[in-house]
Amino acid sequence: MTTPQPFAHRFSQLAEQRSPFCLGIDPSRDLLTRWGLPDNARGLRDFCERVADAAGSSVAVVKPQSAFFERHGPEGLQVLQELMRRFKSVGTLTLLDVKRGDIGSTMEAYAETVFGEGSAYEADAATFTAYLGLGALLKTLERARASGAAAFLVVRSSNPEGTSLQMSRGEDGRTVAEALADGLRAFNEKPGQDAAPVAGAVMGATLPDSDRGVIERLGGALLLTPGIGAQGAGFDDLKRLFAGREAQVIPTATRSVLEAGPDTAALRQALERHLAPARAFRATARPS
Amino acid sequence: MTTPQPFAHRFSQLAEQRSPFCLGIDPSRDLLTRWGLPDNARGLRDFCERVADAAGSSVAVVKPQSAFFERHGPEGLQVLQELMRRFKSVGTLTLLDVKRGDIGSTMEAYAETVFGEGSAYEADAATFTAYLGLGALLKTLERARASGAAAFLVVRSSNPEGTSLQMSRGEDGRTVAEALADGLRAFNEKPGQDAAPVAGAVMGATLPDSDRGVIERLGGALLLTPGIGAQGAGFDDLKRLFAGREAQVIPTATRSVLEAGPDTAALRQALERHLAPARAFRATARPS
């Protein structure tokens, strides 16, 4: 068993070779119905096979949302395993969107579920939340590092209901989001270790300019930015919000691609409409 | 399909008939090893069967921690389904500890996974977290209500790493925990609906007295209090912290029971050591 290259390095390579674009995979009941598929594990499997056929090896990352697989019980999670393996087999990075967050001993079990050879999902990355504190997630980050994976914590979400908690202030005057950003950066910049950042941040693509300060505090962390397309953000929002950080951004869209299905050619076209702008966005990071 | 009685009513009945005690079920690698079982789905199933044999119909509630089942992939979740069904068959309430927390559309899928007839787990209750805001969980609470279930949100955890976030203050001066407590109470007390509280709170059993204010703000919400026994709290902590609220408390212990295994008689004895004090604690709520 050899540790793979760090996620951040593998992402950079694929972003150059393919596109930095990340395809979210949300097989919701609504989408299954639109695609004329039954709302069960068989429909779920058909959905995923069509998405994988259409995506081929065109994207750097795929991000399946676990909830839409869990809905179908153990069979749904078999489909998730198959999907992860299929994308892995064509060299695509798998980022499992599970948003787990609990005390340390429970988080160890979750980390063992998603990260590392022989784990249930062998994900290249996964998402987490920190209501129980960043300290409870440190072993998760350590396991991600040891597995060549990355762990993305929600720092600022773009849903309006999240703002009041995330902008509350601790005794030292920092907001919850700022304190979390500082903690992730400190983990990434701990001396004496590989420079590849393991701790990433989920940052909504529709955040206001006032959140640029939080982005600065994150230093070199990778930035997963869901919400392009159907959630209202465009690549212009990314340019505004993440200016100077373009090479760290993983631009992510879900519904604006998947709604083009079930036809494979139509899906491929919708995907193409995201791949090129994502490449162009990343290219603005380079000195001319 | 008929809606079952609300969770709060069913809990009260069982608390009187049996004991209010809730048995946490955490089949960690450490415990599987101590019990001489293999760290795989077969070992997991043996573990759960022994726990169910020992518990019989003695407790009001069981609280399986999902992470320790998810670790074993789809097979582990089959074991979880079997465990839930077995306890349901003897009239015990099942509280699935999943701590899910995401945006609203994803939360709908999680709520459909755990609550309601025909869902993957048909849980009587489940746990959630609110880093993305209470607003993102409202439909989850609504689905819990429609299913006769309860949804427990982490308000104050007893792990020290959680304090800084949970005690941060919003613009209106309330802490994150206080604002969440007020929101849960408002949901429970919305006019024109059944008086049974659907929104519960996870409140660590080792919290300091300064958290009594948050407990007061929760009004009549049910209070899930993990951490008795191995995590350092005793029934004396419950008496101190939850004085006047005893009938709302679901006293929960996990390791202090499970560490007595694998012998069924020893497990039963360890369980008995919790059932009677839990009954006595609840009895202090009654006017003499």
Image (cartoon, coloured by chain):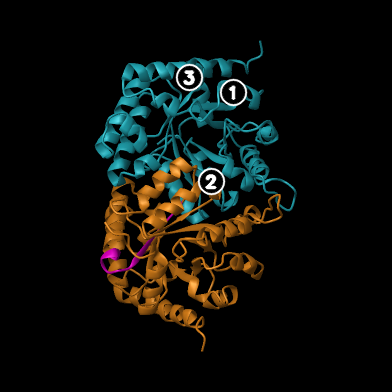
Chain colours: A cyan, B orange
The tag on residue A274 is 3
Q: Secondary structure at mark 3?
A: helix
Mark 1 / mark 2, whichever is N-terminal = 2
Q: CA gap, disc 3 to disc 2?
A: 28 Å
Q: Residues within 10 Å of mark 2 (few under 14, many from 20)?
A: many
Q: Which residues are magenta?
A: B87-99
Circle 1: residue type: Ala
Judged by depth in the image, the label closer to the viewer, 3 or 2, is: 3
Q: CA gap, disc 1 to disc 2?
A: 24 Å
In the picture of the structure, the residue carrying the numbered disc 2 is A129
Tell me, yes or no, whether the highlighted magenta stretch contains residue A202: no
Q: Residues within 10 Å of mark 3 (few under 14, many from 20)?
A: many
Chain letter belonging to callout 2: A
Residue B188 visible in the picture: yes
User: Does mark 2 fall on the same chain as mark 1?
Assistant: yes
Q: Secondary structure at mark 2?
A: loop
Circle 3: residue type: His
Q: Nearer the viewer, residue A37 or B161?
A: A37
Q: Secondary structure at mark 1?
A: helix
In the picture of the structure, the residue carrying the numbered disc 1 is A247
Residue A195 picture location, percent across and down: 60, 32
The tag on residue B191 is none
